[in-house]
Amino acid sequence: MKNNEYEYLLNKIYYKGILKNQGINSDMYQRMQNEYSNLNGQQPVSGQLEREYAFRKSFLVVRNYVQQAIKDGMRSFQFKMETNDINKLTYMVDMLDRNFFDKQSLDQIIATANSVFNQYHLKN
């Protein structure tokens, strides 16, 4: 997944000025992507724990921002949304509450949340 899908989700929910003030942008996702790539590199096993820690740390930051964006989007736009879409988003928030570090699952959640929010042509 491209890091701009992550940024697109956050921009869909929040004002861009808020994101800039908080330092939230695609660089956070890119850092996680780089750490993920380092996990599978051909580097010696001795640094594996440090690489895994770095990935998990950056993954948690991205996961928490995605979860909060979905919650805030539901709160802000729930009266415009269909029940089925609210249920999908609620399920995704619950999945993000679990202790997982699977980048593919996170990417799928971001893509699904984008598709749900895109249906409503939300402009914040």
Image (cartoon, helix red, strand yellow):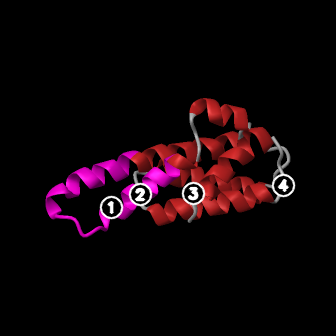
Residue positioned 43% across, 46% down in the render = 60
Tell me which label, 3 or 4, sits earlier in the chain: 3
The residue shown at (81%, 60%) is 119
- N-terminal of the pair, mark 4 or mark 1, is 1
State how far apart marks 3 and 2 are (Cα). Answer: 11 Å
3D distance between C-alphas at marks 3 and 4: 22 Å
Range shown magenta: 28-57
Q: Amino acid at mark 2?
A: Asn
- Where 36 falls versus 75 (above or below)? below
According to the picture, the residue beneath numbered tag 4 turns out to be 120
In terms of depth relative to the viewer, which is nearer, 107 or 33? 33
* Position of 104 relative to 101 (above/below): below
Alpha carbon of mark 2 to alpha carbon of mark 1: how far? Answer: 6 Å
Residue highlighted by disc 3: 3
| Three-letter amino acid code at the position of disc 3 | Asn
Label pair 2/1, CB-CB below 8 angstroms: yes
Q: Residue at x 58, y 39 (%)?
A: 24
Pointer 3 local density, CA inside 10 Å: few below 14, some 14–19, many at least 20: some
What is the quadrant of residue 71 in the picture?
Answer: top right
- Quadrant in which the N terminus appears: bottom right
Residue annotated with mark 1: 38
SS at mark 4 in the image: loop
Q: What amino acid is found at the position of numbered circle 1 in the picture?
A: Asn
Mark 1: give few (<14), some (14-19) or many (20+) Cα within 10 Å.
Answer: some
Task: Determine which residue is flagged by label 2.
Answer: 34
Mark 4 vs mark 2, foreground winner is: 2
Tell me the amino acid under the disc marked 4.
Tyr
Q: Residues within 10 Å of mark 4 (few under 14, many from 20)?
A: few
Q: CA distance from mark 4 to mark 2?
A: 33 Å
Callout 1 secondary element: helix
